[in-house]
Structure formats: C-alpha cells, structure tokens
Image: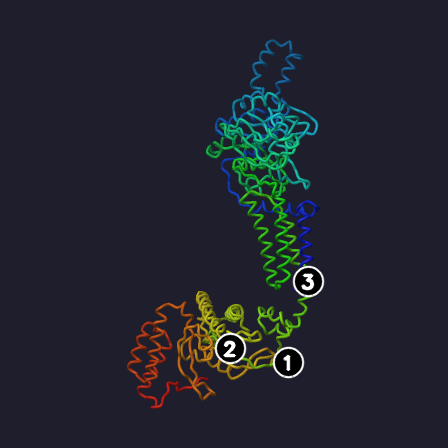
Amino acid sequence: MARYGGRWALGLLLTLAAVLYTLDVWTSHTIARQDTIISDLRMRLEPFALEPGIVIVDIDSKSLTEVGRFPWSRNVMAKLVEQLTRHYEVSAVGFDVSFPEPDTSSGYDVLAQLANRELKGIPALKDEIKRLEPALDYDGMFAEALRGQPVVLGFNLSDSQRKGVLPEPAFTRDFLNGREGIAYSAKGFEANIARLQEAAAGAGVFTAMTDPDGLVRSSPVLFRIGDGYYPSLSAATLATALGATAIKPRLDATVDTMSANERAASSFDTMQMWVDRKPVSFPVGEAMIATVQFRGTGGPNGGAFRYVSAADVLAGRVAKEVLEGTIVLVGTTAPGLQDLRATPVNAEYPGVEIHANMIKSMLDGRFKVRPDWAQSLEAVLAATLGVLLALLLAVLSPAWSVLLAAGAFVACGALNYHLYSRYDVITNVFICLLLVAALFVLNLAWGWFFEVRKGRALVSRFGEYVAPELVERMAEDPEAYNMDGESRELTVMFVDVRGFTTISEGLSPKELREYINRYLTAMSEDIRSSHQGTLDKYIGDAVMAFWGAPVSFPDHASRAVATALLMQDSAARLNRDFLARGWPELKIGIGLNTGPMHVGDMGSKIRRAYTVMGDAVNLGSRLEGITKVYGVGIAVGAATRQQAPEFAWRELDLVRVKGKNEPVAIFEPLGKPAELAGEVLEELAQWEAALAKVRAQQWDAAEEAIVALAARHPACGLYMLYLERIAHYRVHPPGSTWDGVTTFETK
C-alpha cells in the first residue's frame, strides 16, 4: 500500500485547506463569488405557484397612456385608493411610491394668490375661490381617501436630506434593553407630507439594498433612523393586513441575567407581529436582513403574483373577486419610471415584486436563512468528504473512482439543495464541490503518470479483441495475459437470424441497415454486458462469441447459457418493435457448445483476430443450424448442459452431426427451475416420458403423449417434428438394434 501514500498525503492536504477556508482562516473572493452564483442558480431552480392573496396594481404603460404621465395628481391617487378599499374591499394597500411634496397641480394656490393680490378688488372672488377649495385640494382629497383605510405609504432613506415626516417607529432603542440592535441605518429620509402620513394607517421603507455586484438579493425587515426602528414596506403592509399591533424582534427571556457585553453581542434571528395578542413569527438573518426568495423571473408573465393595470382598477374593469380580500401593492413596471431592479433571476425585475416576495415569505413564516451553525456544518462536511475521498480514490479503479467522485459531487449538491428547499437553510457548497473535483483530478493525474501507463501495453494488445469491461481486470496483472495461441476449455456461441434472405428482400437498404444494426447492437450488449463474454466477430447477420478467454471463468458454460436466454428475450422485445414498424419478423437461433478449443491471435500478416478454433467450435456452429430443424431457439451440447446444472433442460434428441460417428445429445435450456412456472415443469416431465416411449418404439403411447402436448402448444415445432417421425417409423420401423439416434445428419 506504500504506492498510495503520496496520493493520501496530497488529498489530506487539500482537505485541510478546504476546512481552513470554511472556518474563515483564509478567504477567497473567487470562491465566495462562485457560492453566490450557485445560490442564484439554486433560487432559479426552486418551483413556485401563483399566489392569489397578493396582487400588484401596476402603473404600467397602459396606465400612463390612459391616465397621463406619472406622477399623477393626488385626486387620481384618491380615486385609486377609494376603488381598492371601498369598491374592491382589499385587506391592505401598500404604496411603493412616496409623496414628499404637496400637490399644486390643481392651480388652487395660484387662484388664491391672485385673489389676494392682483384681483383683490373683484367682489366675492375670495368667497368663490374658498368655495372651490375642496374640489381643488388634491392632497386633502387624497388624505380623506386614506383616512380610516388599511393603506400604507412608502418612503425612502437618504444619506443627508430630511423631507416629509416619519411615521411612529415600530420601537426604539429603549425596547432593546441594552442590546445592540444592528440594522440598516441612514441619517436622512424622503418621507410623505404630514397631512398624508397622518391620514394613512402607517408607512414602510422601500429602499433597495444591493450587493457589491449591483444585484438585489436581500432586504431589511427593519431600518434604523436615529433611535427609532421602522418597518419595511412589506412588513408594514402585512402588519396592516393582519391588524397587527406591533412589529418587534423576539427578545431572549433571560435578558435580565445577561451581562452588558452579552447583551451588546446578542443578535435577533426572529421577528414577531402581534395579532390578537399572539405573535406571528418569521426568521431573519444578521442585522434584521432577510434573503429575498424570488419566485420566478418576475413581471406580469413570469412571477408568482397577479398583475392588474392601475388603469383597469380606476375604470372598474377588474373583476371584484380578483382583488377582494387581497394584499395589494401599488408600483410600476414602466421602464421610464426607474423602478426596475437587477436581481439574480432577472436584470429588470420590478421593484414592487420584491416587496410581494417578502410578504409571501412572512405569511408563510419561512425565510431562507444562514444559521449560526452553517459554517460548522460546512467544515465537518469538507473534512469528512475530503478524508474519505482521499483514502478511497487512491485505492479504487478508475471506473469506480469516476462513480465515487460523481456520486460525491451530486450528493453535495443534492444535500445543499435539500437543506435549502426543505428546511430553508442557506449553506455554501462550492468549496466541497471544488474539493471533490480537485481530489478526483489529483488521483486521475497520479494514476495516469504513475500507474495507468503500466497497463497501456495490455490495452494496446487486447483493445481490438477483448470486451472493454475485461480490460480493467486484465490491467491489474498484465503479465498473466498474452495473445499467444493456447488450448483451453471454453464455451462458444453462434447466433443467426432466421430467414434473413427473405428479410433483406422485404426492406429498403436504409431500413435493412437499421434493422441489422439494432439487432447486432442488442445481441452484442447482452453478450458483453450481462456475463462478460468476448465478442469474436460478425459474420453477416451471424454473431460469434465465447466465454473463458482471455479472462478465465470457471462458470463459462453457465454464463453462456444465461446470456443465450437473455438474448432470446431481447430478440422478442426487438421483434415487437419491428412488427409495429411493419418490418419482417425477427427470430434467432443460438447454438452453444463447451469443449477444448485453440484460442489466440490468428490470421495473416494483413489481418489478424483474437478468436477460437477447433472441433468443439465447429459443433457449436452446427448446433445453431439444428435449432431450425427442431423449432427451438437454443440448442446446446451435452458438455454445456453438464457444466450448467442450475438450469432446467429439455432433451431434444440424439443426433449424428457431420464428421462424427458418435451420436451427440442435444438440449434446450428453459431457465432456472425456481423462475419457471409449475405448468412448464409439469410439461417438461411429460415430454421426458414421451421421449422415452419414442426410444422404446412404443409408437401409439408416444403419439398419444405428444399429441396431448401439441394440443397445448400447436405451434411448437419440436412436437410436430416427432409426430411426423412417429408416422414415418410406423411405415418404416428402425432396426432391432436402434438406439434412438436420429438417422439424418446435420449440415
């Protein structure tokens, strides 16, 4: 085993490097980037379904055409709110837009100024303008539409400026009782004007947070401005829909027993909305930031949420059942309004749908999170995987190494995706995949440069003749194999198609080529794959193979018989397909014989082949021809039958083949007794009794027994053949010394 020491050492060194990386002893931006790519792919693979409870009212191109350019006057927004809350009776409305400045589009301020200055001498002008004020105060109309309705306004964070008024915070630092409430924070904000904010049910932050590559992958649930913590638009909208009285992190019940340092170091991993004095909880990540679970590619036709045009809502063209009781988010997909975000699933993802995905995750109580123990799990997995592969790949054959590495690679990916989809756990997997690939390449290169070269000569010598699946076994001990001629007991097989001349006449050249290619492929695969036979050659439509060389098998006869039975099943399967295509019927005959044969590299200087020769080979060929006479699919010699006792056999006859004086017993294998039906075994016993009567020249009794068998199987050529012989023997009885040997000779 010393030859494996170098590979083991290098493999364990790679494993140590992988474990150190997962423990953040050293870091790599490249590896982290690959994990991000895998995370994006993993998200795109997860299935999704349409969510009927969340609807996006889209300020789309159609709306801009019908209503006018955006931003719309507040009287239009008032009508939109009235339609959603009073007519369609939605459960909540969240605006992915803000209203930081008063709406002066009605012209009321200009008229008031004229009445107070240039036109102040016109009697009753001030009174008339005052009378028109309610109809021209668009902010007032909007505020009145908001009042008492489940409508949440959105606002944005800013680096410096402060515009508009903030809503009441969800909680302040005092609530944290000394904990360090880390959250996405800003000094400024661009909020809504006071009269709108006071009338609304609440407000939430819709600021998008991007990763270094410019993509949106996560979103805070809470934002910090000064000492106050404010919910995101998605959290505030859901809280309004549920009638929640508070949005707060879950605090540890043992906070009073913590030291000041412990409180400052503690983090929040669960948010709670209190509904009817009961908490509705969902997990969050570090700094109260949650991973956005993008469902689909987004937009009206690619996501999990229904889109309806704002123009259709304003005109009342949307069926009430589409919106009634739903959570509505008002946003825009129109390209010119700059609310399309770059995300892992789409470079132009509607920003409003990010909030919809967040609401869906909160409703389900399921966010994709990276728990504290994820890093430890990754380190343990890398260590376990690395050690096992470092040890196993060093001693396994190339084929098994490929399977093991592929299996480990797939298992890592499957485990990672299972944790993600089933348990919502985010773990990094690229370092493990890289470790598997590195260990596999290391062992592959090591084997090529230091070990595989020893077997190249053997592969070169036997590659043309020997089944590829045996080369690996031969390569383990190349000196034990050569191509010199030798005598050895083997089992040979000959296979031929019945009536091939007729078949070839009934098919076009192209069809004939496909016919014969499919047949030869199926037969060859059975010979080589099932029981490791050596495929010798094709002789037209015939196939020749043998077992026991160059790799010796003590059970070569049993392997050959099992393969012959498998080939008959394959031929029947092919025949059904051929008949369905309108092609001629496929039937094959197989001859098997066991005996001493010469095997080796034989031929001329021009062409050579690794093949078998001898009297036993010739008998195998003649046995294949005998199958036609007896109407059976397989005929074997007595030596083959003797060396494969695990099969049930039907004796066919005693025959004198051409070139031999001694009779030869021939048999047909039926299968293993345990796999045969009881009727088959019963019929076999009846046939043996009938054959004994034939050889005893008890013609009447023999005929009666065989007629009974033929009645059950009228198409059996064997029974018909013997009935013809009995009729012949009645007229021309054999001599008194007849030994039951068929008097005709095979070809």
| Mark 1: secondary structure | loop
* Residue 205 horizontal side relative to residue 558, left or right: right
**Cβ atoms under marks 3 and 2 closer than 8 Å:** no
* Residue 248 horizontal side relative to residue 619, left or right: right
What is the x, y in percent for residue 150? 52, 26
Is residue 114 or residue 677 the one in the foreground? 677
Is residue 153 or residue 241 the one in the foreground? 241
Residue 208's image quarter? Answer: top right
Q: Which residue is mark 3?
A: 446
**Cβ atoms under marks 3 and 1 closer than 8 Å:** no
Residue 159's place in the image compared with 21, above or below, is: above
Q: Which residue is mark 2?
A: 491
Q: Note whether residue 511 is visible.
A: no
Colour pattern of the rendering: rainbow
What is the x, y in percent for residue 454? 67, 70
Is residue 443 or residue 561 the one in the foreground? 443
What is the x, y in percent for residue 692? 34, 81
Q: Which sits earlier in the primary sequence, circle 3 or circle 1?
A: 3
Q: Note whether residue 452 is visible.
A: yes
Q: Which residue is mark 1?
A: 606
Q: CA distance from mark 1 to mark 2?
A: 28 Å
Residue 440's place in the image compared with 333, above or below, is: below
Please name the amino acid that badge 3 sits on.
Trp
Residue 113's place in the image compared with 311, above or below, is: above
Local packing at callout 2 (Cα closer than 10 Å; few below 14, some 14-19, many 20+) is: many
* Residue located 66% across and 72% down the image: 457
